[in-house]
Image: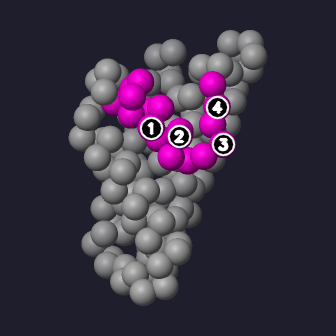
């Protein structure tokens, strides 16, 4: 894949992350917290995939995407270590929200997930503008 196509794919994925984040905020305002958690997580996921678009690598499973990002971008401190913990928490909450019928969603947890999505989006947007 050429550098131009990689950059375009990264921008496309970042745009998707932005839309997911906007959807999360709307759903949170509507008190649809489970759905808001899902969209906040997907904003995080698409932000990460935007970074990976610059490399000749892709994964089918979410856990593999996150593991690669943690190994190559968090542990090397390209991005702050604390964001890695927040990503893991967002992934867990998204899975619980989507698959656990008895999971009780707390509004403050949803707000926290949205803040994580915003923080990561801003960090990655800045990173991609430098690349």
Evaluate if marks 2 and 3 touch, with contact meaning CB atoms under 8 Å apart: yes
> For the magenta stretch, what is the residue range?
57-74
Please name the residue shown 32% across and 21% down the image. 76
- For label 2, the residue is 64
User: Which residue is denoted by mark 3 in the rendering?
Assistant: 60
Residue 106, horizontal then vertical, whole percent? 31, 78
Q: Is residue 112 placed above or below 35 in the rendered structure?
A: above
Residue 26, image x, y percentages: 51, 70
Mark nearer the viewer, 2 or 4: 2
CB under 8 Å between discs 4 and 3: yes
Q: Which residue is mark 4?
A: 58
Magenta highlight on residue 109: no
- Front position in the image: 35 or 62: 62
In the picture of the structure, the residue carrying the numbered disc 1 is: 67
Q: Earlier in the sequence, mark 1 or mark 3?
A: 3
Left or right of 57 on screen, residue 44: left
């Amino acid at each position: 894949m050429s550098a131009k196509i990689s950059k375009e794919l990264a921008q496309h994925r970042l745009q998707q992350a932005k839309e997911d984040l906007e959807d999360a905020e709307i759903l949170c305002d509507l008190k649809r917290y489970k759905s808001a958690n899902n969209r906040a997580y997907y904003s995080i996921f698409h932000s990460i995939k935007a970074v990976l678009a610059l490399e000749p690598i892709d994964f089918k499973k979410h856990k593999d995407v996150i593991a690669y990002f943690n190994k190559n971008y968090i542990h090397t401190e390209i991005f702050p270590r604390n964001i890695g913990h927040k990503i893991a928490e967002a992934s867990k909450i998204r899975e619980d929200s989507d698959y656990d019928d008895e999971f009780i969603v707390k509004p403050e947890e949803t707000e926290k997930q949205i803040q994580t999505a915003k923080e990561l989006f801003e960090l990655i947007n800045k990173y991609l503008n430098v690349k």
